[in-house]
Image (cartoon, rainbow, N blue to C red):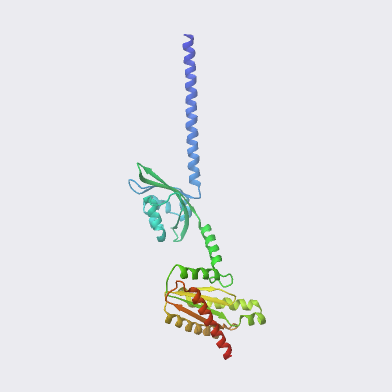
């Protein structure tokens, strides 16, 4: 009888301890989940769960979306499952489609642009996890981080790599890369125009290098304005510029060179303290493959012929 009573007491104690343990365990689990939820809610990144089956629906999107894309975005996502397709950049639409159809490598980051409520596009890097059920893609979840600063830094770096520091036109390295592209990879009608400043040394020696630099910059800006989107304008030497035109005809190139001389004359009439004197030469071919070096040499020779002819006249 005594053993029975003792057993009952021990059993009750064990039950109480077990219940207390389960209660503590449940409480700890709740606290743990609540902590995770608070971390998600406070994250500066957009965290989401997008359901694909049975219908498209945003099951969860973190509040960061309001900070990054503007007030009202969260409500728009909740009310309209097509909102991501409405705000994605047109060039990134295919990426969005592949993400929800499984036709993408989910192990790689997804770079895309989304439009905020003010109409500006922002860059995001997304890491997505697909959710499958019985082999069928039923949802995607992911984290999206704004990378505007990173993209701008990369763009600035790329600009510095490809552009001349003094003039902001393309530099010699970019020119040579473009030459190589049309010499080896793409066949097209092409022309190379070379422009050389005639009296830069005289200006540097008599008025200083600041004046000479100003002449170089003014000449570069004139060429850039004149050729606009028609061509690649590069500074390939201290006083030399090179222009590559593609998908063009010889008559058009000849006309451009003639009108360029007229544009230079107009500039000189309106300029108060600078006069641009430029020798020009060009070469043209209906095919670029294997011809680019020869074209450059031909344009260079024609440019120096033009320079010598002007010296003989002066």
> Which x, y percent locates residue 303?
53, 82
Q: In what quadrant of the picture does the C terminus appear?
A: bottom right
> Which x, y percent locates residue 70?
46, 55
Farthest left residue?
54
Residue drawn at x 48%, y 84% is 258
Residue drawn at x 48%, y 14% is 7
Q: Across the whole image, how many numbered discs are drawn on residues?
A: 0
Q: Nearer the viewer, residue 188 or 17?
A: 188
Q: Is residue 39 above or below residue 70?
A: above
- Is residue 183 visible to the viewer in this orientation of the structure? yes
Q: Is residue 142 above or below residue 191?
A: above
Residue drawn at x 47%, y 35% is 30
Farthest bottom residue?
313
> Which x, y percent locates residue 126?
46, 52
Farthest top residue?
1
The image quadrant of residue 212 is bottom right
Q: Nearer the viewer, residue 30 or 204?
A: 204
Is 307 on the left or on the right of 85, as rendered?
right
Is 168 on the left or on the right of 251, as rendered?
right
- Is residue 49 visible to the viewer in this orientation of the structure? no
Q: Is residue 223 above or below residue 180?
A: below
Q: Nearer the viewer, residue 221 or 105?
A: 105
> Which x, y percent locates residue 170?
53, 70
């Amino acid at each position: 009888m005594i053993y029975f009573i003792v057993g009952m007491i021990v059993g009750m104690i064990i039950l109480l301890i077990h219940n207390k343990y389960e209660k503590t365990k449940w409480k700890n689990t709740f606290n743990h989940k609540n902590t995770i939820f608070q971390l998600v809610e406070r994250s500066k990144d957009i965290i989401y769960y997008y359901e694909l089956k049975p219908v498209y629906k945003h099951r969860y999107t973190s509040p960061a979306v309001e900070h990054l894309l503007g007030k009202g975005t969260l409500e728009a996502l909740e009310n309209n499952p097509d909102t991501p397709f409405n705000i994605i950049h047109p060039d990134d639409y295919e990426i969005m489609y592949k993400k929800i159809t499984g036709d993408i490598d989910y192990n790689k980051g997804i770079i895309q642009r989304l439009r905020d409520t003010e109409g500006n596009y922002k860059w995001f890097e997304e890491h997505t996890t697909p959710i499958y059920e019985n082999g069928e893609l039923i949802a995607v979840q992911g984290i999206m981080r704004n990378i505007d600063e990173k993209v701008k830094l990369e763009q600035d770096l790329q600009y510095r790599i490809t552009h001349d520091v003094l003039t902001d036109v393309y530099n010699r390295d970019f020119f040579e890369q473009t030459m190589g592209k049309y010499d080896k990879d793409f066949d097209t009608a092409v022309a190379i125009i070379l422009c050389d400043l005639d009296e830069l040394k005289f200006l540097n020696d008599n008025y200083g290098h600041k004046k000479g630099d100003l002449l170089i910059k003014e000449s570069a800006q004139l060429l850039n304005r004149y050729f606009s989107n028609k061509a690649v304008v590069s500074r390939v030497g201290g006083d030399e510029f090179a222009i590559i035109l593609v998908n063009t005809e010889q008559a058009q190139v000849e006309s451009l060179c003639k009108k360029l001389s007229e544009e230079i004359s107009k500039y000189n009439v309106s300029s108060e303290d600078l006069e641009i004197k430029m020798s020009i030469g060009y070469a043209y071919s209906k095919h670029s493959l294997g011809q680019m070096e020869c074209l450059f040499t031909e344009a260079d020779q024609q440019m120096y012929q033009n320079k010598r002819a002007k010296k003989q006249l002066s």
